[in-house]
Amino acid sequence: METLVRNPFILTPYVPEAYFCDRAEETAQLCKHILNGRNVALFANRRLGKTGLIRHCFEKKEIRDNFNTFLVDIYSAGSIREMTGLMAKEIFSRANILGFKDKLLKGIKSIRPTIGYNELTSSFSLSAGIGEVSEPEKTLEELISIIDSLKKPSVVAIDEFQVIRDFKEPNAEAYLRAVFQRCRNTIFIYTGSIGHSMNNIFKSPDKPFYNSAVMMTLGVLDRDVYCEFSKRMFSLYGKSVESALVYKYYDYFDGVTWYNQLMMNEAFAQTGTGETITEKDFDSVYEAIIAQQSFSCQEMFARFSQKQKELLRAISNEGKEGASITSQAFIDKYRIGPASSIQAACTALKKNNFVTDNEGRKKIVDLIFRDWIRKSQA
């Protein structure tokens, strides 16, 4: 039997096969697209596990043995230069593993990578990042050309791809499309967490990426499937969890994978061998999670303006359904100013992804942060 990990509810992006919950249909679908040479635009709301799904597919034998794989998160990028730096970092890192360091060194002319020496393995490694990129367009074209010329075909997954809409270069989408469509030996997976932005990029006839990828959507895990998975993981370690507790967390967090895993990770940690954790332990587990994240929540909250703090408090008190912040009822209830000042505060919060809009109702994106505000900032 394989050595067990200390806690089977893994929170990192890559999850070993034995601890990966379901997604059999989605895994088969994504692998099928890759094996048949199709570019993919994968949409999922944040924290549903799209990055984990991609890593899971990349570890499948038929993909691992036949493709060079790369995964780049460009969420923090605000320009082609910053995106190029992130891609350079990933490609140089993978070159050490996939064995094309020499080809990369010969083919890259526009940046000077850092060469490091590992005393444990007696080998040299390459690295590069945003700081080395002075000619971003030239560098990006060189990087893409090199991985496209490798013997095995390449798969490049670009996470949070919708951010290219906000790049400072006015022609960013057209330029990236022109670079990527030259590839003959590379498949692209574009993932995004904002549905309307992804649709605008890939389904609008006047956009450069129109119909350049097959669309794929990732939903929440099935409620019963996740419950059975949780019970099986507890049983594997000689522990037990009531179905009612798993369902209660699932429903409270609307089935979002990351929150499910976080709650069950803590529930598992609080349960001794031979013990059973039950529905009555819901609050103790969740309070432990909030306490663990209290410092980072305090740091985050302190950065907001007074008006933003007042608005966040008000929205948090409205619970899961969110708030219609410009309604007269909301304004009268919380007395935090006129509709115009509330809207201005909300615009800044939305821009930085702290608040989202769902059918006209504003919700705090991070559900734990929402409940921390409600409990500690009343």
Image (cartoon, grey):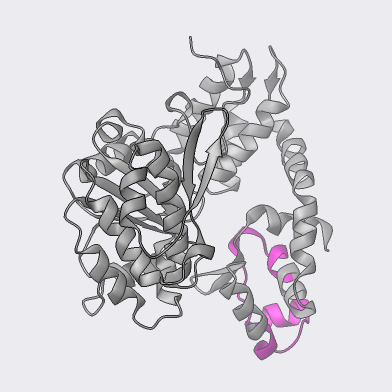
Give me the residue at 73% from left, 64% from top: 317
Task: Please give the range of residues in magenta.
Answer: 314-342
Q: In this view, does 104 lie above or below 352?
A: above
The C terminus: image quadrant: bottom right
Residue 20 in the image: x percent, y percent? Answer: 45, 31
Q: In this view, does 308 lie above or below 274?
A: below
Quadrant hosting residue 206: bottom left
Residue 342 in the image: x percent, y percent? Answer: 68, 83
Q: In this view, does 57 lie to the left or right of 11?
A: left
Give me the residue at 58% from left, 48% from top: 253
Q: In this view, does 17 lie above or below 114?
A: above
Residue 326 in the image: x percent, y percent? Answer: 62, 83
295 or 244: which is nearer to us?
295
Q: Does the magenta stretch include residue 325?
A: yes
323 or 266: which is nearer to us?
266
Residue found farthest to the top: 1
Secondary structure mostly taken by the magenta-highlighted segment of the chain: helix
Residue 113 in the image: x percent, y percent? Answer: 47, 55
Quadrant hosting residue 144: bottom left
Q: Is residue 198 magenta?
A: no
In this rendering, the count of numbered labels is: 0
